[in-house]
Each structure stands twice: as C-alpha cells, then as structure tokens.
Amino acid sequence: MGLLEGRSAVVTGAAQGIGLAIARACVEEGASVVIGDVDAARVESAAMAEIPMGRAGEPEDVAGVAVFLAPDLSAYMTGAVLEVTGGRHI
Ligand SMILES: NC(=O)c1ccc[n+]([C@@H]2O[C@H](COP(=O)([O-])OP(=O)(O)OC[C@H]3O[C@@H](n4cnc5c(N)ncnc54)[C@H](O)[C@@H]3O)[C@@H](O)[C@H]2O)c1
C-alpha cells in the first residue's frame, strides 16, 4: 500500500519537469492525481503518455465492461475490482 492510498492531489505546472515528476510520484504512491498546466496541449500529451493504450477512456469503454459482466458467463465472478484504464495500472 502506497503512502498516498485513498488521497487526492492536484499538481499544477505538471506538463513537464518537476511538476510532472511530482504527479508521477503521487500516482506511484497510490494517489488519484489531477494535473494542470498553462500549456493545455502539452499537459494533454503528458497525460496520454501515462496510458499504454495511448488514448483517454470513452464512456463506451465502460459500457462495454458492463455488458461483459451482464451475461451468465460472468455469474461466478464476485468481488472483483476491474480496471478500465487503458493499461495505466499495469
Ligand atoms: N529544474 C531545476 O533544477 C529547478 C531548480 C530550482 C527551482 N526550479 C523552479 O521550479 C519550477 C519548475 O521547474 P521545472 O524545471 O519543472 O520547469 P519546467 O519549465 O520544466 O516546467 C514548468 C511547467 O510549468 C508550467 N507553467 C508555467 N506557468 C504556469 C502557470 N501559471 N500555471 C500552471 N502551469 C504553469 C509550464 O508550462 C511548464 O510545463 C520553476 O519555477 C523553476 O524555476 C527549478
């Protein structure tokens, strides 16, 4: 369990440099992190670089998981927490 499990952090100036390093360190310690920067395009690409699938999740991505869980094929599956994060926590 990380030092910041269950905590939230907002890091400004996080498109690069020290701010980005702080944001990454907070994530590694289990925090939910929101990043901001005056350079919107660069902060967007910094955020996307953290997602192995290279794109933000869409509502349809979560809807697909709900359908995956709905049929009887998953009836014996209980108590699982599913990550729908494009591989970010792998
Ligand atoms: N890198 C060093 O060795 C070092 C040492 C001592 C102090 N500092 C200071 O620490 C700070 C960060 O350094 P760095 O190397 O990460 O710089 P950096 O230039 O790599 O990153 C700074 C980030 O802050 C963003 N930014 C600028 N103004 C902003 C604002 N008003 N609101 C939100 N975001 C804003 C920039 O777009 C950029 O992405 C700077 O003030 C720097 O002077 C850096």
Image (cartoon, rainbow, N blue to C red):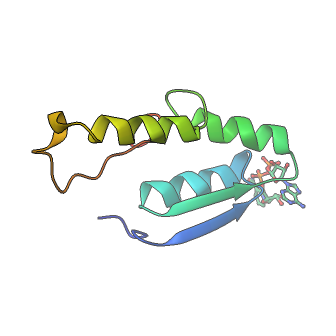
Residue at 72% x, 52% y is 14
Considering every residue shown, the one lying at the far left of the view is 76
Observer able to see residue 47: yes
Q: In the image, is 67 to the left or to the right of 40? A: left
Image-quadrant location for residue 88: top left
Image-quadrant location for residue 42: top right
Considering every residue shown, the one lying at the far top of the view is 53
Residue 41 image offset from top left, x and y in percent: 82, 38
Q: Nearer the viewer, residue 32 or 20?
A: 32
Q: Is residue 13 above or below residue 10?
A: above
Q: Quadrant of the N terminus?
A: bottom left
Residue at 42% x, 61% y is 29
Q: Nearer the viewer, residue 13 or 58?
A: 58
Residue 4 image offset from top left, x and y in percent: 43, 70
Q: In the image, is 16 to the left or to the right of 67? A: right
Q: In the image, is 57 to the left or to the right of 81? A: right
Residue at 47% x, 41% y is 62
Split into quadrants, the picture shows ligand 1 in the one at bottom right
Q: Quadrant of the C terminus?
A: top left
Q: Nearer the viewer, residue 62 or 86?
A: 62
Residue at 42% x, 71% y is 6
Total number of numbered labels? 0
Q: In the image, is 22 to the left or to the right of 7? A: right
Residue 49 image offset from top left, x and y in percent: 60, 33
Observer able to see residue 90: no
Q: Is residue 14 above or below residue 67?
A: below
Residue 39 image offset from top left, x and y in percent: 86, 45
